[in-house]
Image: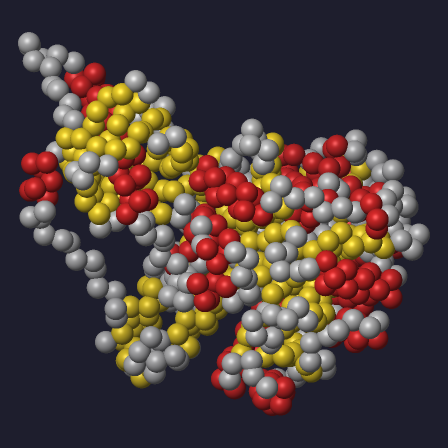
Amino acid sequence: MFNKILIANRGEIACRVIKTAKKMGIKTVAVYSDADRDALHVRMAHEAVHIGPAPSSQSYIVIDNILAAIRQTGADAVHPGYGFLSENPAFAEALEKAGIVFIGPPVGAIQAMGDKITSKKLAAEAGVSTVPGHMGLIEDADEAVRIASSIGYPVMIKASAGGGGKGMRIAWNDMEAREGFQSSKNEAKSSFGDDRIFIEKFVTEPRHIEIQVLGDKHGNVLYLGERECSIQRRNQKVIEEAPSPFLDEETRRAMGEQAVALSKAVGYFSAGTVEFIVDASRNFYFLEMNTRLQVEHPVTELITGIDLVEQMIRVAAGEKLSFSQDDVKLNGWAIESRLYAEDPYRSFLPSIGRLSRYRPPREGRHDNGTVVRNDTGVYEGGEISMYYDPMIAKLCTWAPDRLTAIDAMGAALDDFEVEGIGHNLPFLSAVMGQERFRSGRLTTAYIAEEFPEGFSGVLPNQAAARKLVAIAVLVNQALQERAVEISGTIGNHRRVVGKEWVATLAGFEEAVTLEATLDGTSVVFADGRRMSVASGWLPGQSHAVFHIDGEGMGVKVNLVGSAIRLRWRGMDVTARVRSPRVAELARLMPKKAPPDTSKMLLCPMPGVITLVAVKAGDHVEAGQTLATVEAMKMENVLKAERKGVVKRVAAAPGQSLAVDELILEFE
């Protein structure tokens, strides 16, 4: 077995590998860039080596820098994680030449499967069903349009060396094919140093289902069930689960056997994933093979009990797999939610900054038999950088059945506190409560179909609003009683806290009366409805569990001036609790109008301007490209919403802008 492993990666996957290596008694080495000097993976490892500036092109994907760190520390094996150099055959070859073990597949398999064009040809030869498309390289945008037209729209434009949703666009017409080709090419060059592009047919109403494979150096290859990865945003997976609610045992076996056949055809060993597109009739088509550990591997670990990182290490050390295909049993259900530093209220655009609060839910087995796991690479007070992927954490739950696992995820998301940056926790919570998700009716178009106008939060219905009103009134009562205790008695007078209140939130207004009970407080609504409310919340607490008629609700509580902000299950409401007289006067107050920004193009996220396509005096049409902004390895094209004339250009290529900083102004 190895004495010391260097992890050629960062963030949560580096932390994940370090945990298993330590469990196995193996020393670990972290590498870090300027931006990651104080990162969690650096703190967790036994040793850490600086490898260069913040951009990954100058640090994490520079092979010579990694080799220098290996020589410096005497590591005898390298785990690449995912992304960066994990599927770079030149890196695996360089390690082999240096006498260092690569904890991954053989170079030939990386070369064959890492190139999507070659992999599709090999898959077809191995008897694996494939998607129709043009497997040759595309030279320019004109050729992309011709090929896309011949295949038939819609088509998928993809980077040959791509992965993780980078360098990928869907085109529904010639204009989108032309623009998508250039954007895919730019992203591929930036992310992988390889701008080769190909095109294939886009399967409508598709599910994205992948098979986990595991092989050793002795010719044994197994499949460990499937993962449903259909809920995606910009071709990046957001929510995954295992097993899939769609597959039957016959389809699962067929997909698994084809995945194993492909793996054996290329002499594969280590952990890997064969990805398929599955249509509504359970016809499946080979998409690609990822010759590395997948981001979503924890859900497979939770339903199989197999530590995939440990198996990768043991296989790399030459050990045989200690179990057979018949030993692989799928137990229960697991859900993974990817927590991203992306603001769902701003079309999921990246957000950077300091984590002023980061409190994950309690991990491990809970009293109700469910399990919570959180894989992360951040900590409270740490920075979310613009240079890397925006993932903060991967929150996973396990339960004996799917609906219980979903409910456990909803509760865990309620208990997850993140402040200081924009993040997608409200969106993840919203999905857990949707009937379509709970019934398992998933496709890769799920987000676009369920949130066609973007995500603007979850509006409470009357039942939910009343629960939140009851909580707001209880919080207000605690604040009022605390104020009385602080002010004390003035002369012979002591202020009496009233029992009648009017609460407003999310368009609802409720008049209530509080009555003390033996086990808490009873909130009585104007129509006579009663709710029993109990909680240990104290002023200053940002999260507490409130029991409404015996039902526990994990709610985030923040005071915003005289208002109370409550967040629960994707709802984000500001409640105001007033005495009846003050509420009467508040109804007479005029509403403040928001500022007019209709004649401005503002930067929607922190990033670097890579293109300004217009100048002062230009007439622009609706849909015309105005500028592009790059952040967190993604290129974002900003287009005109309507006709107009450019009055002033305030930003230039290469300039770094903050959120809402001015790019253009129109007449």
Q: Residue furthest front?
A: 528
Q: Is residue 129 visible to the viewer in this orientation of the structure?
A: yes
Q: From what the image shows, is residue 16 above or below residue 205?
A: above
Considering the image in quadrants, where does the N terminus appear?
Answer: top right
From the top left corner, tell me how far across and down residue 331 is, in percent.
69, 44
Q: Residue at left 62%, top 60%?
A: 246
Q: Position of residue 584 (x, y in %)?
A: 7, 42
Q: Residue at x 15, y 23 (%)?
A: 497
Q: Would you identify the image quadrant in which residue 526 lies?
A: top left
Where the C terminus falls, by quadrant?
A: bottom left
Horizontal side of residue 603 vs 617, given as left or right: right
Q: On the rendered structure, is 578 left or right of 467? A: left
Name the residue located 38 percent from the left edge and 79 percent from the top edge. Answer: 623
For the point 16% across and 33% down, which residue is it? Answer: 501
Q: Residue furthest top?
A: 492
User: Residue 111: image x %, image y %?
Assistant: 80, 66
Q: What number of labels is visible? A: 0
Closest to the observer: 223 or 565? 223
Q: Is residue 600 left or right of residue 378?
A: left
Q: Nearer the viewer, residue 575 or 563?
A: 575
